[in-house]
Amino acid sequence: MKTTFLFMDESKAHSSAPANLRVTKLTGLLIPSELHRTFRDAYYRALVRVLPAEHSTVPALPEVHATDLFKKQSNVSDSDRIGFVNELVDIVLKLNIAVLNIGYLTKSVTFAQSETHIVGLCFFNFLRALHDTLDEGIIWPVMETDNTPKQDLTFAGTLQGVDNAVSRVPSASASVSINFKNLGEVLYVTKRSAFGATVDVIGYILHKRWLRQQGVELTVFASALADVAERLHPVLVADEIIRMEAAQ
């Protein structure tokens, strides 16, 4: 049976954005297990090109944050940064990695107790979008950890709750709308991971593209990132920012 890992990264609403354009979202990369080594090799080649070793030394492994992108390294130019992001997109396209990007306009989800609740809605939408993939094989969700019990309850707790309910009332399985038998328990990762870093960058540039679509004026650098994000169109299996409408 085919095994696939769903690497995910959440993005909370930024206070610097206009109130009506603040978004809480989740981005995911669907990595087949047989491609994990190929993906990692390509990622580290891209990393070496943007941060080459000096005098044959091995520098410490950096955490790659999309909001930073090597700004602390004075020898890395904006052109280098854009080149690195393009290389990550090249990897995703060459390996035909499915990308999911689902969010909500934060203020429109009036019933949410917190942004973590909204991210949980995004996760459920992921599982619905991956219905066919779940029927074909096992998916292990992998979330970038924030080391909080609330996050664990939102993600790992989704499947654990289903398992617990079905074990006690087997007939309850008929009311579960996802193939939970092929869904692995949620694992966790950090941005030190090639996959964790890549999904963070992909989510970030897709948000820049969305802001531009909404008419927001971007900096030259942010606009260049939005241009790179346009290249992802062939592998976007879910791409939506949802506005919840109040009941009349």
Image (cartoon, rainbow, N blue to C red):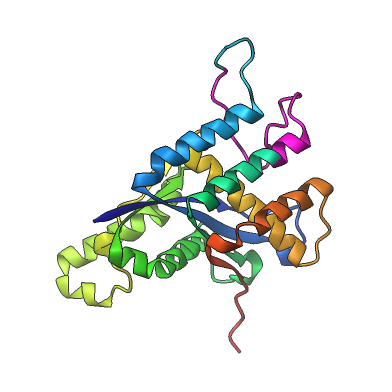
Q: How many marks?
A: 0
* 178, 169: nearer the viewer: 178
Q: Residue furthest top?
A: 55
Where residue 51 sits: x, y (%)? 64, 26
Residue at point 59%, 68% (across, down): 240
Region of the chain picked out in magenta, as a range: 59-82
Q: Is 10 or 147 nearer to us in this picture?
A: 10
- In this picture, residue 211 sits left or right of residue 245: right
In the figure, is residue 97 to the left or right of 84? left
**Residue 33 in magenta stretch:** no
Position of residue 227 measured from the top left corner of the image (x, y, whole percent): 73, 55
In the image, residue 67 sits, relative to residue 184, either above or below, namely above
Q: Which quadrant of the figure contains the C terminus?
A: bottom right
- Tell me residue 143's x, y (percent): 44, 48
Q: Position of residue 243 (x, y in %)?
A: 63, 74
- Tell me, yes or no, if residue 190 can be seen here: no
Identify which residue is drawn at 76% across, 24% down: 74
- Residue 204 against residue 133 in the figure, above or below: above
Residue furthest toward the bottom? 248
Residue 216 occupies quadrant: bottom right
Left or right for 87, reference 144: right
User: Which image quadrant: the N terminus?
Assistant: bottom left
Query: Does residue 121 appear in this view?
Result: yes
Residue 69 falls inside the magenta stretch: yes
Main secondary structure of the magenta stretch:
loop
